[in-house]
Image (spheres, grey):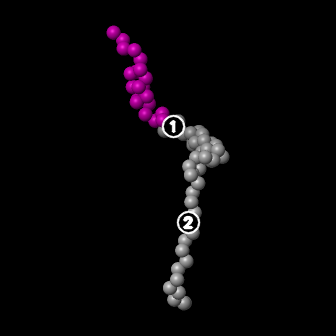
Amino acid sequence: MSANPQRESATIYMFPAGGRARSPEAARKARFAAEIAALRVSNAVCSDSWYHEEAVREAAEPAKH
């Protein structure tokens, strides 16, 4: 093993101004991923508390006098 006191410096690359926001392809992929994630929502998780849903429905009905 040699003891070399000189170190190579790192190369610094600049990112484009605006990042990926300027890429229509990246925006399309992000929209598609969001749509796929929205399809994966389970109704079982949302309908597990039927009593809460019933209370919300009753609260939305007009009051009976």
Amino acid type shown at disc 1: Ala
Helix, strand or loop at mark 1: helix
Which sits earlier in the primary sequence, circle 2 or circle 1? 2
Counting labels gives 2
Residue closest to the far left? 65
Examine the structure image and report whether residue 3 is included in the region drawn in magenta: no
Quadrant occupied by the C terminus = top left
The quarter of the picture where residue 14 lies is: bottom right
Residue 6's place in the image compared with 19, above or below, is below
Q: Among all residues in the image, which is located at the extreme right?
A: 25
Residue type marked 2: Ile
Task: Say which element carries label 2.
Answer: loop
The reply to whether the magenta stretch includes residue 47 is yes
Q: Which numbered circle lies on residue 12?
A: 2
Q: Which residue is mark 1?
A: 44
**Whether residue 36 can be seen here:** no
Residue 6 rendering spot, x and y as whole percentages: 52, 83
In space, the residues marked 2 and 1 are separated at their CA atoms by: 49 Å
Tell which of 48 and 12 is nearer to you: 12
Magenta region: which residues?
Answer: 46-65
Q: Which residue is at a point 53% across and 36% down the rendered structure image?
A: 43
From this viewpoint, is residue 6 visible?
Answer: yes
In this view, 57 is above or below 4: above
In the rendered image, the quadrant that contains the N terminus is bottom right
Looking at this rendering, what residue extends furthest in the bottom direction? 2
